[in-house]
Amino acid sequence: MKRQLNLLWMLIPLFLICCKQEPKSKDIKEVEPQKFTGAKGEVKLMTLDPGHFHASLILKTMYDQMNPEVHIFAPDGDDLEGHLARVEGFNSREENPTSWDLNTYRGDDFFEKMIAEKPGNVMNVSGNNSKKTEFILKTLEAGVNVLADKPMAIDAEGFQQLEKAFQVAEDKGVLLYDIMTERYEITTMLQRALSQIPSVFGELLEGSPEEPAITKESVHHFSKLVAGKPLTRPAWFFDTAQQGEGIVDVNTHLVDLIQWEAFPGQVLSKDDVELVSARRWTTDLTPEMFKSVTHLDTYPAYLQKDVDGELLKVHSNGEIIYKLKGVHAKASVIWNFKAPEGAKDTHYSIMRGSKCDLIIEQGAKEAYKPTLYLASKDNQLTTEDLQVAIDELAKKFPGLGLEKLEDKLWKVAIPEQYKVGHEAHFGQVTQKYLQFLKAGKLPDWEVPNMITKYYTTTAALQLAKQQ
């Protein structure tokens, strides 16, 4: 009996050790989320696996609030070298050079290394999307703010993970935000503003599947110039399992703009979305086309599933027709290999009102520059009516003008100073995010609307695959 009691006393400590909660790894630094004040250099950026050129465009300008030392965590390879070269180009340019000090870690354990060391308080991720949502979630769980390139989710499973990420961000007191550059394009800003003036626009129509009340169409190109140089695309960019299909990639911007313009400042939810139809189709690339943008002689093994004969068939195109709070909308994206001479990526948009249509076109007749038109319905508007609205907007955008083209059709004359270009919009978004960090929160509608946006795109992908 005594021996049994002694044995019991010996086993009790072992039992307590086994039942004790597993301690957190000593490699993970536990830090409280920082409260930002707007002080110089208080934001410390970490760049994670910068496989997409958007990561470098954030660094095309300097920000007082952001520390010039940027910590980069990435696997070694061409994606990283391309990013470093682009940032170095910004640092060494003659006009208004940047002064970023890049501290680079190279290794396959790049994410684990970043989480363990956490030398920054904001993480930017812009690259391969296959693990992006997972990286976002784990970074937020570590108490780090995230400024993410789109898309933050490329399928239904990723969407569920993203919903969890937003909840974690709220619980941890950190901010998750995606980079919606198109909100800063001047014709889009003015289209939105004019749609909010009842004397000009009237009310947004409900539309129909055949003639949606609001349409956004975007045409992109695999072969293009970035920062004045031919863009080399990584081979994985053409694998929709890693990049995401067009219906969930570029369409993120278009669905965002539909929400932002049609329902400004309103909180939206998944219940407000009713999918009508969705479709997807491929852009076919020859081996020569593929080589010209990747510099690879053959298709990697992971692309063989998409090869038919010699053609690489990329599901980069997609269209969504849906109802948002009863309003019919259409978002579609098309990827061509190369733009016509003198052209760039283009955008078309129309908002149909009871008094006029607000139309953005960017075709040959506009010299491939976004141009905003107002088309009156049934002679409801006069030049005098429109001039009053333009004069009011000119208080915010000095220099705006109005040009009558023909009966019932006008063009908004926009000074060149507002046409800063797509690359500059990344700096504008980053500056806005820095303001959110200082405020300690996003606008009340931003998070629910991001959730609604990614629900729309990922649910549309599911529907398109069924059709």
Image (cartoon, rainbow, N blue to C red):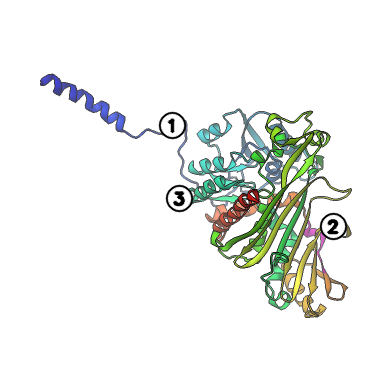
Q: Residue at x 77, y 30 (%)?
A: 296
- The quarter of the rendered structure image containing the N terminus is top left
Of the pair 347 and 414, the residue shown nearer to us: 347
Cα–Cα span, label 3 and label 2: 47 Å
The secondary structure type at the circle numbered 2 is: loop
Q: Which residues are magenta?
A: 411-419
Tag 1 residue: 25
Tag 2 residue: 363
Q: Mark 3 near mark 2, Cβ–Cβ under 8 Å?
A: no
Q: Is residue 191 left or right of residue 173?
A: right
Cα–Cα span, label 3 and label 1: 21 Å
The secondary structure type at the circle numbered 3 is: helix
Q: Nearer the viewer, mark 1 or mark 2?
A: 2
Tag 3 residue: 171
Asked if residue 150 is among those painted magenta in the image, a careful observer would answer no
Q: Can you say whether 412 is above or below 14 in the image? A: below
